Each structure stands twice: as structure tokens, then as C-alpha cells.
Image (cartoon, rainbow, N blue to C red):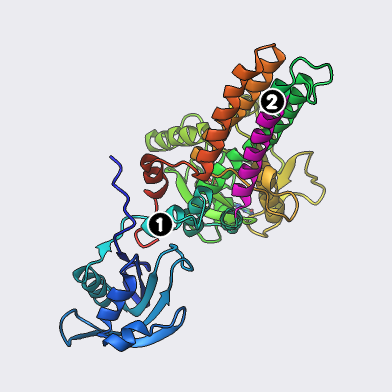
Amino acid sequence: MAEPRSLLDTIVALATPPGVGAVALIRLSGPRAQEIASALANDDEESATAWPERRCRLRSLYRPGSDDVLDRALFTLFRAPRSYTGEDLVEISTHGGVSIPASVVDACVALGAREARRGEFTQRAFLNGKLDLTQAEAVGDLVAATSPKRRAVALHQLERGLGERIAHLRGEVIGLSALLVQHIDFPEEDDAPTSIETIVSQADQVTCEMDRLLATAPAGELLRHGAVTVLAGRPNSGKSSLFNALVGTERAIVTEEEGTTRDAIEAVVSIAGFPFRLVDTAGLRDGAGRVEQMGIEIAHRYLASADVVLYCLEAGEAPSANETAFLRSLSCPIVKVFTKWDLAPESAAPGNGELPVSAVSGEGLSDLKETLRDLVFQGIVEGRDEVPVVTNARQADLLKQARAEVGGFGKALAAGIPPEVAAAHLKTAESALEEILGVVATDDVLDRVFRDFCIGK
Ligand SMILES: Nc1nc2c(ncn2[C@@H]2O[C@H](COP(=O)(O)OP(=O)(O)OP(=O)(O)O)[C@@H](O)[C@H]2O)c(=O)[nH]1
Ligand SMILES: [Mg+2]
């Protein structure tokens, strides 16, 4: 069940990761933040009222009700509403490690603060109107980003890139309702200001715009999790060597023996700025021994769920009829990679759509990386400007719902359903778009959005 959400509590948490480090940051937010910070610093009445805003003060920090100094720390006060959470917020920078930050959090609790739940600071920022829900989600994405592109998309979303697009679409849907009202108000006149045809064609335009945004959802999902990229091919075709070259370290064992790799080996790498989950697999062949055969079965499981396959063939070799049939049976894009290109005769020339690479000389690796990027993330690489991207299932599901409703509205009108009845579709579409932004957000929705956040964020 959703926990009750009160903004009356003052909450506290360690915002930096626990453990040994030079400094730790403790955040204290809520109506009593400054009062508690003053008590920590043993302020007398006069200095308690003279806290400067947004300026650091270096103070001793005491165990409550005693003269025990816990640390010398920097205090910074952000007064409501000019703070991350929109409420009074004090940031306390202490020495790092395990002991001091924990004792400062304990001291704040002893003085009346409550330990914050996951993502509760960002949740308060949302509840206080500092962020819409897509921006709050972007904060989580930003912290979790493992590749420059995911970071860039999250930053763009934090700057309301996606929020503005959704708000714009909401405006369009409201515009459709307004046109409909105009039409309903003049039903009998010959020259009604807005014809049904006009409204239907406007609705079509809105659905097209929604489709364009929805088309970014698969790439958005891949940005979060990394595109599963499976290296497959015959034994000894150079898969592990290519895997190592792409990862940049000698992760997988390479030998001249066939059947070296058995278990699948995974590594998350950033390729051309985008996240990929590379998987090296056992070479595919008939008549392998028991352990190797188990490895081949694992390879098949990965191939079935791959986002893209790098099929490795030695330079000069051609896929057999069996291999060609097998590759056709896969549902994801396949890049045929011709390995060991440094050993290929001078006269060898890559065919159309074939990528020559050499793990030894590095030849062809940058072409391969670009090919991977374009193949998987083509929707969001064009141009320099950041395109708003639908980044998670919550946004995608609601946008799909809104799209279906606007589509249903257009169809209903075109089929002669009375405009007053068709209008119900627009109301539902509007609510779905509002839910993306969090204009209306139930506690359950908030719990789902914030449960993956860390404590202190
Ligand atoms: N000259 C040259 N040799 C390569 C290259 N890539 C791989 N090799 C050699 O080819 C042999 C097999 O390489 P691996 O990377 O182990 O091949 P694999 O496909 O992972 O093999 P299995 O795991 O047995 O299926 C090794 O002796 C490598 O040194 C290359 O680009 N150039
Ligand atoms: Mg191998």
C-alpha cells in the first residue's frame, strides 16, 4: 500500500554513497530544517536567526544536548522555495567515511527529523511543483546513466524536453475540444466555422505527432538497459577477440583452439556514446562435446532475445546454406562481420553490407561501431539537437492510450457519431497526457516512479 505523503515532516538522509570518501553530504529538508541545523551547531539565539542563505558556514557540529564535537562541517541553507525540494533545505558537508555521516543523520533524527525514504527529496520537489513527473524520472535516469547518450537524453528531459512536448500535445487535444465546441454551437448554420472534416484532419495531425514521439520509445528503452548485442559464429571465427577489442580489455579467453568459449560473457560498453550489452558466446557447430554443447544452447537463448547480432565469419569465408537459413530465422538485425581482415589477401574486397574488421590491427572497428549505433539508435542520432525521447514504459503506455483515444475520436466523428459523444475520447486522452506530467498523480503512481531511486536523492 502507498505510504501517506506528508510534507510536514522534516526529512534527513545521506546523499552521497556510504563508505570511505573525502566528504559526505547530508540533506535535511522540511519546515524544521534550519532549526535542527542550528541545534546541531549549538547556535545561540542570535546566530540561529542570522543564517545566510546559499552561503557556506564552517561550524562545529555537536552531539545533541552535549559538548561532544562530532565533526567540523560546512552548512548551507537554501530557503523555500529556492531549493531543490522547494522547502527549507540544509546541506551539511561532513568528513566522509562510515562513522561521521551516520552519527550526523542520527543526531538529526534525535532532534526531530525523520529518515527519508527512497527518492523522497525529488518526490517533494515534484509535490512542491519544482519538477513535473517526467523531470523527476529524468533525475533517476541521470544518476543511473552509464553512457553519454543516456545522460544527454536524461538531461534534456530534466530541462523539460519531453515535458514540453507532452504539454504541447495536451494543448492540441484541448484545441480539438474547442473546435468541437464551436462546431456544436453552430450545428444548423450553413457556414459553421469549423466543419467535421477539418476537425477530423486536425485529429489526424495530432495522432501523427504522437506516433512520431512514440517511435522513440524502443530506442528509449534500449538507452536505459543497453542494446543486447550477441557475437555469434563458427568456433574460432574471432568472436572473443572482437569482443575484447570492443570492450577494450582482455575479458574473454582467446586461443587458437576451436571451442574455447563456453559460457556466455557479458560486458556493458558505451559505443559511439550509446549503451550496448555485448555478449560473447560459444562457437556454433554440430558434434561438440557435452560442455561445449551446453554453451551452444546458451548462445541460442541469447540469440533469441538479441537486439542485434554480430555474425562473425573469417575473411574469405562465405556463410553455408545452413547458416544463411539460420540467420534468416532470427528476428533482429544482423551484421555480417568478416574477421581477421589483416590476414586477408591484398586483393580481397568486402562485399556489399559486409564489414571487414581486424581485432589485431583495429581496422574496421570504428565502422562497426558506427553501424551498430545507426542500426539500433537511428531514431535518436539525427542532428545535433536532442530529440525528446519516451524513456520508460509508464510514459509509453500513457502516450499510447492518448494516441488510441485521439484516433478513436477521429474515427467516431468520421463515422457520423454525434460530436457530443465522440468528445469523451478527448477527455480520456487529455487525462492520459496529464498523467504523464503528473498533473494528477495518485500515491501508487508516485510509489512506482520513486521506488527505484536511491535514498538521499
Ligand atoms: N591475425 C588475426 N588473428 C585473429 C584475429 N581475431 C582472432 N584471431 C585469432 O583467431 C583465433 C581464434 O580467436 P577467438 O577470438 O578465440 O575466436 P572465437 O570465435 O572466440 O573462438 P571460440 O570461442 O573457440 O568459438 C585466435 O588464435 C586469435 O588470436 C584477427 O583479427 N587477426
Ligand atoms: Mg571465443
Amino acid type of the residue tagged 1 in the rendering: Arg
Question: Number of labelled discs?
Answer: 2
Instruction: Please give the residue where the numbered disc 2 appears in the rendered image.
Output: 180
Type of amino acid under label 2 = Leu
Counting from the top left corner in percent of width and height, residue 213 is at 65, 39
Whole-percent x, y for residue 93 in the image = 37, 78
Q: Please report the residue visible at 68 percent of the width from the left and 31 percent of the height from the top.
A: 178
Q: Give the range drawn in magenta.
A: 160-182
Q: Tell me if residue 161 can be seen.
A: yes
Give whichever of discs 1 and 2 has the lower sequence position.
1
Drawn side of residue 219 relative to residue 299, left or right: right
Q: Residue furthest top?
A: 416
What crowding class fits label 2: few (fewer than 14 Cα within 10 Å), some (14-19), or many (20 or more)?
some
Residue visible at 58% across and 44% down? Answer: 220
Query: In the rendered image of this protein, does residue 132 appear above or below residue 208?
Result: below
Say left or right for 224 vs 374. Answer: left
Pinpoint residue 250: horizontal percent, then vertical percent. 50, 59
Name the foreground residue: 104 vs 371. 104
